[in-house]
Amino acid sequence: MSMRHDINAPILQVVGLSVRFETPLGLVHAADDVAFDIYEMETLALVGETGCGKSVVASAIMQLLPGNAVVEGKALFSKMDLLKLEEKEISRVRGNEISIIFQNPSLSLNPIIEVGEQIAEPLQVHRKMARRESHQVAKGFLSRLGLGERSLMRMYPFQFSGGMNQRVMIATSMILSPKIIIADEPTKGLDRALARDVTSEIEKIMDLTGASLLLITHDISLAAMISDRIAVMYCGEIVEMGKCKDVLREPLHPYTCALLDCLPERGFKPIAGASPSMIDPPQGCKFHPRCPYKTQECMQKQRIRKIDGDERQVRCWQY
Amino acid sequence: MAGDFNRVASCKATEWAKILRLDMRGLRIALFGLLLFLTIFILAAFSDIFAPYDPWNRFEPFLAPCREHILGTNDLGNDILSELIYGSRVSLIVGFGAALMATLIGTLIGLFAGYFRGLMDETLMGITDVFLMIPQIPLIIILAAFLRPSFWLVALIMGALWWTSTARVVRSKAMQIRETSFIECSRSLGFSHMHIIFSDILPNILHVIMPKFLLTIASAMISEASISFLGLGDPTMKSWGMMINFAFTRGGFINGYWWWYLPPGLCITLSVLSLVLMGFSLEEREEETMRIE
Amino acid sequence: MTFSGKKAIRYFLAIILIFSLNFAIPRAMPGDPLANLLGEDVMLTEESIAELRAKMGLDLPLHEQFLAYWRDIFSFDLGYSYHLHSPVSAIILSRMKWTLLLAIPSLILGAILGTFLGALAGWKSRDAGQKFETGLVLMIYCTPPYFLSLLFLYALSFKLGLFPLKGFYSTGSALDIAHHLMLPVIVMTLFSLSRNYMIMRGSVIQERGNLYAAYARAKGLYGEEILFRHIFKNAILPIITLLALDFGFILSGALFIEIVFSMNGMGNLIYDALLSRDYPVLQGSFLVITVMVVSANLLADLLYSRIDPRVRWQ
Ligand SMILES: Nc1ncnc2c1ncn2[C@@H]1O[C@H](COP(=O)(O)OP(=O)(O)O)[C@@H](O)[C@H]1O
Ligand SMILES: [Mg+2]
């Protein structure tokens, strides 16, 4: 896969994104000072354990968070700050220029609307296309994903398997050729063979539409397969970011190392200690309670170290 | 989630205030309902203190509101304000009596259906569906017509008819709880079914029974008012529905004596409202906490 | 057994049970069953009483009476009213049309307005204007329909003179009937609206938290588009049966509204029968209302299974 991003300007720039939720138990710090760029036609993988705030970041960019969320920071996209747009304005971006594939396809699709109509809906909403015409287009997209049979258009999500629903979501997300597609755990809950199918379909779309992909996953091996760059998240923060090859070959942050050691081919070593609470996160580096290399500094402050210009960065005192 | 509870202890005081305010949001309305209800309850409990006269005492009939009779007098010369205050009693007694009985039946049927399932569930829910379809007000009218009205009878009939929605809710909740590991545990320890139902499951569904209970009181009150309006109320007790009936049939309405029928009507609306506000907001809270879990 | 088979049995049982209850009531109640069946204050000589007792089969064993009861029902014989000197079925038939004239437009209007306004109220439940509207509807919800009728009658007919005071018609022309019906229909619509509104509002509040609603927003749908394209149908499906169950209660409301507006329908028939203890009329009305309520529920069940694909495809 090419590295065209060196020459292009980023199409999405996320700067200092913080998300907090007000809950009866206290403030949940779900994302803290998150920053990354996405370049044209590249795939950026956001990896981290379940609950570290990946989905929250995706939803924040699309302004899809519930009312109890307090969002700070910027998400610059074609000269707009997505986080400051009015609901009416952001609704023109959603599904049209940036589309998202939710984590749970079977619950995300409307249970009582035919899948054909659900795929065609963005055409009707954004392009004001007539129903019949939009269904034609939708059918074309479905058959490209291997669901060509005519009758499938008139089926309901409950008649489909999880994998088929996943493809319906993929077709819906690409039908307007958006600039960015966000895929939230596209392979979660699928068996290995299905996951491979879905992965190759996602790659196919990227080639087809020329869209950039923000791939959200807890599965490092998936990220390794299809992404150009990787951002590793821990407890609401991006702790390390860089080219996929570099990060996997030579991980810098102790958390990235620990995460890689969890992989089956590296011996399944679990990370010592428990994930911290997001209501009352540790001071300084959030990983310090579990870190074998912690020093006095780690417990008080954080530092972001940039290597090779902006190519590589790591949130750790060791470097 | 459980781990997070320990963290609450370290929360700062300012955040506590926020937490309290957040939690109050659903309850403010319920609290308003409670206040309204308590007012009515106190009026009913101490009618003899609050009422200026004995409601059966006769003064000059058809008096307009004046200093001695703030809401005037009716066709028989009874003081309307005193009637109004005493009228709260029937409303509350019938409401509570009917709701107590309905809730008891509904809870039992729901618990048994949800816990035992299978044939028991089919049968009990079949009965519930049949009961749901009985046109209740017409049936109450017929029975009250045959039996010569008394307020405990009306309460009894309503209680025997109105357990269905409670039964449905309790059943689905009992089914959920039955599947939890904690009940599995009780079962494997060899506790009897009855023990599990009443000491393990029941305490865990009281919070869904409560709003249903309140809403059943409201339904019973509004129906009692309707039955009394038809003249089927207990003739030995003053009731709001009956006051409106008299105002309507004995010229109070035609002559525009609003003080005769407006206050009892408002009393019915307000007391039903107080219960509905509490019931609805408790139900909504219940749904919200379910979502957070 | 299939889902609908089970349902059918329940409807059948409901009808059998309620009709049997109707058979049992006059025979089980205190007093002479003959009086309970004829109505009170019916003046009759000794001989004619004995004759009637034989004619009505009251000297037969109970199970034969029960069979005869069902035979009568299947031939639409609901007894004879000695107060009105007419067969009960004929009386009910002539009165029912007026009740339906009041109830049907109000039920339809109330269902449409109630579900739409309720859906909007649930969608924007945090909006201050909506809260005010919900408060108003809640007041109506908590008011007995007869009192609501009195209020409207007082304000609009007495004070403002906009509507006639009572009855279905004075000249009998369609326009005149419509003028007389207007106010009761408004009251009845408000009453049925308030109940549908509260149910629908709750359902939308529950549905809008589902993931598919968030996904609709993520696809670029805006505001009410999400409500009407995605949530409305999902919210109304689970409550179609609930709305139908409420039908009995709403219909009872119509009876009270009629009484206040002195309209010549079922409500006043029942009211007058109550005053004169005309039991055959009371019982006949009860049966007819039961049949209507059960049919409404059956209809709702059928409708539900037609529009919910998950049931249709089972
Ligand atoms: N609406 C919400 N209210 C409170 N906390 C939330 C809410 N949504 C998410 N969170 C919290 O934010 C954190 C991150 O969640 P999420 O982004 O879904 O994780 P993941 O990395 O698995 O996608 C979790 O701890 C979760 O409990
Ligand atoms: Mg996630």
Image (tube, grey):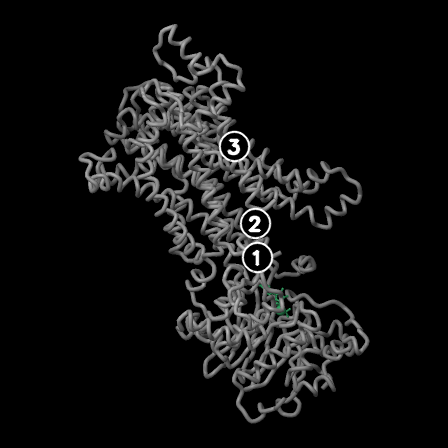
Real-space Cα distance between discs 2 and 1? Answer: 17 Å
Q: Quadrant of ligand 2?
A: bottom right
The residue at which mark 2 appears reads as: B286
Say few, some or many: other residues with alpha carbon within 10 Å of mark 1 (under 14 / 14 to 19 / 20 or more): some
Please state which of residues A293 and A270 is positioned toward the viewer in this rendering: A270
Q: Residue furthest right?
A: A267
Looking at the rendered structure, the kind of residue marked 2 is Glu
The residue at which mark 1 appears reads as: B19
Nearest to N terminus: mark 2 or mark 1: 1
Q: Chain of mark 1?
A: B
Indicate the position of residue A122 as horizontal and vertical percent values: 46, 72
Real-space Cα distance between discs 3 and 1? Answer: 41 Å
Indicate the position of residue B184 as horizontal and vertical percent values: 75, 47
Real-space Cα distance between discs 2 and 3? Answer: 26 Å
Please state which of residues B77 and C54 is positioned toward the viewer in this rendering: C54
Q: Are marks 2 and 3 on the same chain?
A: yes
The kind of secondary structure element at disc 2 is: helix
Name the quarter where the N terminus of chain A is drawn.
bottom right
Please tell me the numbered disc located at residue C161: none
